[in-house]
Image (cartoon, helix red, strand yellow):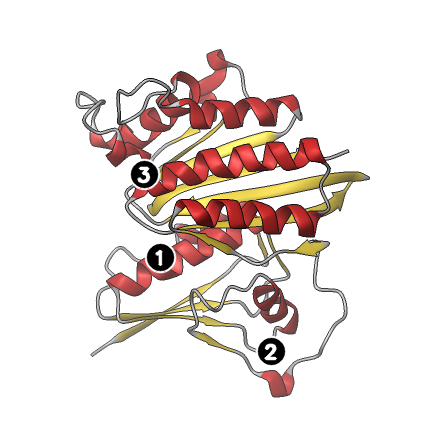
């Protein structure tokens, strides 16, 4: 008999509460229907909506069924529609009869559609679309292009899967903040660099692989110029005095910290999430 497992999503789903949310999933989910309960959710970040998409698509391959249950939560249902989430994962429930419609959809001032990355042309189309919608100047557009093209190219060459981009622009503490998340559902940095890090134990592989990629520019390939994508992206974020965090497999690491403090900011043995997720925030003003 198929089991049903209902997981209540935190009311504010951000990078911190995401880790608690991921830890709630049972280890054995075969022949299980998983319901993600969004009844009490009031806010979700651009990073978390991409991570949720990756998670739902991954779980759907492992168990019988995954559904998002919005109940009558009109705000969250409209947020997911605004992000254009449902073309990539369409299993959901929403009780429109009982909902109370609201004008204010949450903290994001500009909602942009989730954009897929499967081939090189997708990168250029994504940058062009985002540049127009965000009304960026030439310097800002160039920085956005470099970030998306460098990380997007890594997805195409290394992940063996499809990737996604989400971008939000919000006003926070009187600053104009750009939030960028680029993620894929592929093999992850650890598996990609496994041959280069063959002496590293599996439980530490993801964390060390992220560190090596972010701070040393290590790449699966030995060609000249390889491995500069993440370092170049980190440099742009630092110029804007922003923040970058990379999560892959069961580890994540912040890039805006001094090298001597790496161990204190490296999180290991997290709940597994396939692929790699790059979360970037920086001020446009």
Image height of 128 relative to 32, above or below: above
Residue located beneath label 2 in the image: 72
Residue at left offset 33%, top offset 21%: 218
Of labels 1 and 3, earlier in sequence is 1
What secondary structure is marked by label 2?
A: loop
**Which of the 4 quarters of the picture holds residue 157?**
top left
C-beta proximity under 8 Å, tags 2 and 3: no
What secondary structure is marked by label 3?
A: helix
Circle nearer the viewer, 1 or 2:
2
C-beta proximity under 8 Å, tags 1 and 3: no
Residue located beneath label 3 in the image: 157
Circle nearer the viewer, 1 or 3:
3
Q: Quadrant of the C terminus?
A: top right
Residue at left offset 50%, top offset 60%: 9
Nearer-the-camera pick, 174 or 149: 149
Of labels 2 and 3, earlier in sequence is 2
Q: Position of residue 107 (x, y in %)?
A: 71, 54
Image height of 128 relative to 280, above or below: below
Nearer-the-camera pick, 169 or 201: 169
Residue 14 seen from this side: no
Q: Position of residue 167 (x, y in %)?
A: 59, 48
What secondary structure is marked by label 1?
A: loop
Residue 154 seen from this side: yes
Residue located beneath label 1 in the image: 25
């Amino acid at each position: 008999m198929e089991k049903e497992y209902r997981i209540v999503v935190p009311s504010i789903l951000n990078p911190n509460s995401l880790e608690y949310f991921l830890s709630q999933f049972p280890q054995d989910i075969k022949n299980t229907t998983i319901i993600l309960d969004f009844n009490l959710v009031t806010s979700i970040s651009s990073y978390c909506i991409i991570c949720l998409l990756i998670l739902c698509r991954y779980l759907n391959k492992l168990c019988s069924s995954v559904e998002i249950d919005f109940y009558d939560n009109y705000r969250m249902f409209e947020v997911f529609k605004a992000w254009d989430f449902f073309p990539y994962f369409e299993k959901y429930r929403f009780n429109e009869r009982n909902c109370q419609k609201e004008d204010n959809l949450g903290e994001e001032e500009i909602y942009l559609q989730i954009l897929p990355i499967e081939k090189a042309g997708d990168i250029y189309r994504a940058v062009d679309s985002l540049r127009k919608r965000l009304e960026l100047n030439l310097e800002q557009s160039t920085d956005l292009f470099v970030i998306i093209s460098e990380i997007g190219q890594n997805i195409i060459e290394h992940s063996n899967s499809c990737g996604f981009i989400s971008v939000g622009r919000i006003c926070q503490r009187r600053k104009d903040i750009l939030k960028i998340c680029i993620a894929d559902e592929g093999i992850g940095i650890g598996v990609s660099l496994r041959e280069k890090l063959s002496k590293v134990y599996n439980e530490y592989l993801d964390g060390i692989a992220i560190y090596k990629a972010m701070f040393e520019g290590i790449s699966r390939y030995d060609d000249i110029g390889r491995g500069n994508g993440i370092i170049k992206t980190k440099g742009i974020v630092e110029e804007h005095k922003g923040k970058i965090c990379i999560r892959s497999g069961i580890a994540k690491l912040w890039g805006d910290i001094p090298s001597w403090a790496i161990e204190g900011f490296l999180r290991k043995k997290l709940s597994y999430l396939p692929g790699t997720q790059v979360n970037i925030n920086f001020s446009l003003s």
